[in-house]
Image (cartoon, rainbow, N blue to C red):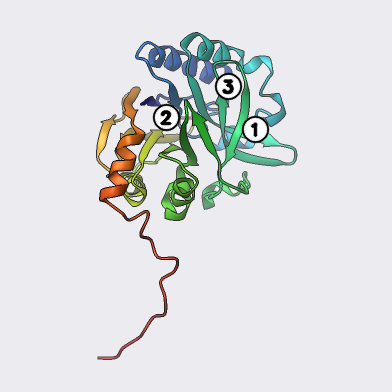
Amino acid sequence: MLRVAAAQAASVSGDVPANVATAVRLVELAGSQGVRVLLLPEAFLTGYDEAAFSGPLPDADSLQDAWLDPLRAAAAASGLVVVAGTALRRGDRRTLSLVVVAPDGHTLAAYDKQHVDADELPWFTAGSGGSSLVVDGVELGLAVCYDSSFPEHARAAADDGAVGYLCSAAFFPGSAHRRDLALPARALDNGMYVVLAAATGTCGAASFIGGSAVFDPEGRPLASLGAEEGLAIADLDPAVVAQTRTERRMHAERLPGPGPRARHSA
């Protein structure tokens, strides 16, 4: 089994060192509880805020530089993999990305958000493909927020062998109903675990509602948070995924297409 944690805490708009320091604290807390993979919310390292997005961003080519050394050191000391949401500069483009920091210090930008929300389009461009992360032989699909609203996104990860779906997100007040429907549905659709790390508190002019959670392969919450800082921790068991997919066959029995449609008048 693979122990994962969805972390949530407030981040500071545009203050990357402060947010890295908060991430380090969460890594240390997770490491003390045997966590192997820690997921942080969307744009956590830069802050999810218009002022941060329009200002200077970390460069994708700088991920081995000193600004991430504290997070690398914490990952090494705790023996866990960190998946951190951040805004990145990629040449003349900006992306909402997931950066992976491994215990051996290797750091890479593993995924760029493919479904960029309309409110984010003034700053960001969409990623061109999906991505998975394999830890201890367990494959985990990567997603950022709005990606999870599209069933085919999680489906593609499951088709490729993912037994878990890591979604780094930021939900505004008034969006709890969408959060609470979409993420469990992706678990149920595909018979796989879903891990949601959601922003909380205030960040510049923005505020967020938290709700980080881990859902089992039938969409039931195994661990969850409200708006407080903390960790939602659960163990992912590939055997449970296999058993669920045997009993609940939606993933295997999906039709290749809806077929012809008829329209009747009454």
Q: Amino acid at mark 2?
A: Thr
Residue type at numbered disc 3 = Val
213 up-or-down from 22: above or below = below
Q: Quadrant of residue 163?
A: top left
Residue 202 got which mark? Answer: 2
Q: Amino acid at mark 1?
A: Gly
Label for residue 16? 3
Q: Within 10 Å of the Cα at label 2, are there few (<14), some (14-19), or many (20+) other Cα atoms?
A: some
Q: Gap between marks 3 and 2, in whole Å?
A: 15 Å
Rendered view: 56 above or below 19: below
Distance between the Cα atoms at labels 1 and 2? 18 Å
User: Disc 2 on helix, strand or loop?
Assistant: strand
* Mark 1 vs mark 3: in front: 3
Q: Quadrant of the C terminus?
A: bottom left
Q: How many marks?
A: 3
Circle 1 is placed at which residue position?
A: 55
Mark 1 vs 3: CB contact within 8 A:
no
Q: Residue at x 36, y 26 (%)?
A: 1
| Residue furthest right as drawn | 91
Q: In the rendered structure, which disc, 3 or 2, sits on the residue that comes first in sequence? A: 3
Residue at 38% over, 35% down: 195
